[in-house]
Image (spheres, rainbow, N blue to C red):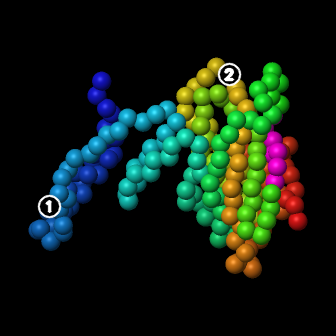
């Protein structure tokens, strides 16, 4: 079996080589036009950008999204990382629904422990956004392998709280995936 090659990456590499070669030798030419293709697991997101590749493996925070940057610069909170764990409620016939289990709000951090029900084969790409200047919405995109069952997952969102911006409009509530049934008020 041959590894797949992303046509956009290949085209961009040849375009860059053509621009460097056609500049009359004034631009530094790449030393080699080779590309290593590494097989990816089912829980790996891969994307090409102008500045390079972003590889996200397993359950992780999406870096530098528009929503996270707005949350940081307007609302003084930023998703730092996400921890993945088995569900604290255990595996039962009735797993219940997605919910926020615990909120820990300090001067510099917000830790949100959530229980998420999703496809058993999934890993998660996580993000945050602030809605209506008051609600911190925790986002999780399930991806990976498909299974014929649902499982309970524990996701812990580690959020940095910036106190250096006195004009920041801090959120007062948290919810998961715009689901108002998960809405909880942040501790004072």
Q: Nearer the viewer, residue 30 or 129?
A: 30
Q: Secondary structure at mark 2?
A: loop
Q: Position of residue 6 (x, y in %)?
A: 34, 40
Dividing the image into 4 quarters, which one contains the C terminus?
A: bottom right
Which residue is most to the left?
Answer: 24
For marks 2 and 1, the one nearer the N-term is 1
Q: Secondary structure at mark 1?
A: helix
Q: Which mark is residue 21?
A: 1
Residue 17, image quadrant: bottom left
Q: Position of residue 93 (x, y in %)?
A: 81, 21
Report, in whole angstroms, how far the alpha carbon at label 2 lies from the one at label 1: 54 Å
Mark 2 or mark 1: which is in front?
Answer: 2
Magenta part mainly helix, strand or loop?
strand
Q: Residue at x 83, y 31 (%)?
A: 96
| Residue 116 in view of the camera | no
Left or right, residue 94 beside residue 140? right
Q: Nearer the viewer, residue 166 or 23?
A: 166
Q: Is residue 158 above or below residue 23?
A: above
Q: Residue at x 70, y 28 (%)?
A: 151
Q: Residue at x 32, y 47 (%)?
A: 9
Q: Position of residue 2 (x, y in %)?
A: 28, 28
Q: Residue at x 83, y 62 (%)?
A: 172
Left or right, residue 14 beside residue 82? left
Dividing the image into 4 quarters, which one contains the N terminus?
A: top left
Q: Which mark is residue 139?
A: none
The segment highlighted magenta reads 97-103
Q: Which residue is mark 2?
A: 149
Left or right, residue 138 beside residue 64? right
Q: Is residue 88 above or below residue 53?
A: above
Q: Position of residue 143 (x, y in %)?
A: 57, 36
Q: Number of labelled discs?
A: 2
Q: Is residue 43 magenta?
A: no
């Amino acid at each position: 079996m041959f590894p797949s090659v992303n046509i956009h990456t290949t085209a961009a590499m040849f375009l860059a080589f053509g621009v460097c070669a056609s500049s009359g030798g004034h631009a530094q030419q790449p030393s080699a036009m080779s590309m290593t293709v590494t097989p990816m697991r089912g829980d790996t997101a891969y994307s090409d950008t102008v500045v390079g590749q972003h590889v996200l493996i397993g359950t992780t925070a999406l870096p530098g999204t528009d929503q996270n940057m707005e949350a940081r610069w307007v609302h003084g909170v930023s998703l730092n990382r996400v921890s993945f764990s088995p569900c604290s409620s255990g595996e039962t016939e009735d797993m219940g629904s997605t919910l926020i289990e615990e909120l820990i709000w300090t001067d510099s951090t917000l830790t949100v422990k959530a229980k998420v029900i999703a496809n058993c084969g999934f890993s998660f790409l996580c993000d945050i956004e602030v809605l209506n200047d008051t609600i911190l919405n925790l986002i999780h995109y399930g991806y990976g392998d498909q299974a014929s069952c649902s499982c309970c997952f524990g996701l812990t969102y580690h959020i940095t709280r910036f106190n250096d911006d006195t004009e920041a409009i801090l959120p007062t509530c948290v919810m998961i995936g715009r689901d108002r049934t998960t809405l909880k008020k942040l501790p004072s």
